[in-house]
Amino acid sequence: MKKTVKTLGLAVFVVLMTSTFGFAEYATASVSEFPYFQLGCLIVGGMTIVSLKQKYQKIYTGELMGVFTMYTILVALFTAPVFNAIKNLVS
């Protein structure tokens, strides 16, 4: 029961992070610039991390949450709105 609760908690965290990314990109970009590819990468990465937790129970849930958080930040850095904002800051 304990392993199911931890895996479910990780799955909820992944869904919340992915939906936060989607909402932030929707709020900052137009529909034509929405990063569908990056959203798909987050979904596949989240499913991979949840399946790793389900298969290998000795991996800590907090570690996997940290890994997915860093992965989300990395994916967000390579979207058009963030790239344009960084370009405007530099120039």
Image: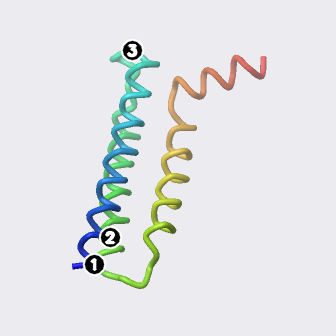
Q: Amino acid at mark 2?
A: Lys
Q: Dot 1 surroundings within 10 Å: few (below 14), some, or many (20 or more)?
A: few
The residue labelled by disc 3 is 30
Question: Depth check: 85 or 66 in front?
Answer: 66
In the picture provided, is 28 more to the left or to the right than 4? right
Which class describes the residues within 10 Å of circle 2: few (<14), some (14-19), or many (20+)? some
Residue 6 is marked as: 2
Q: Position of residue 77 (x, y in %)?
A: 57, 38
Going from N to C along the chain, the mark reached first, 1 or 3, is: 1
Which residue is drawn at the image coordinates 56% and 46% (left, top)?
74
Quick check: marks 2 and 1 in contact, CB under 8 Å?
yes
Q: State the quadrant of the N terminus.
A: bottom left
Where residue 42 appears, x then y in whole percent? 38, 48
- Work out how far the residue at label 1 is from the one at label 3, CA to CA, in angstroms: 43 Å
Q: Nearer the viewer, mark 1 or mark 3?
A: 1
Instruction: Report the amino acid beneath label 3.
Output: Ser
- The residue located at (47%, 56%) in the rendering is 68
Q: Which mark is residue 2?
A: 1
Q: As drawn, is 81 to the left or to the right of 61?
A: right
On the image, the x and y values in percent for residue 43 come to 32, 50
Describe the element under mark 2 as helix, strand or loop.
helix
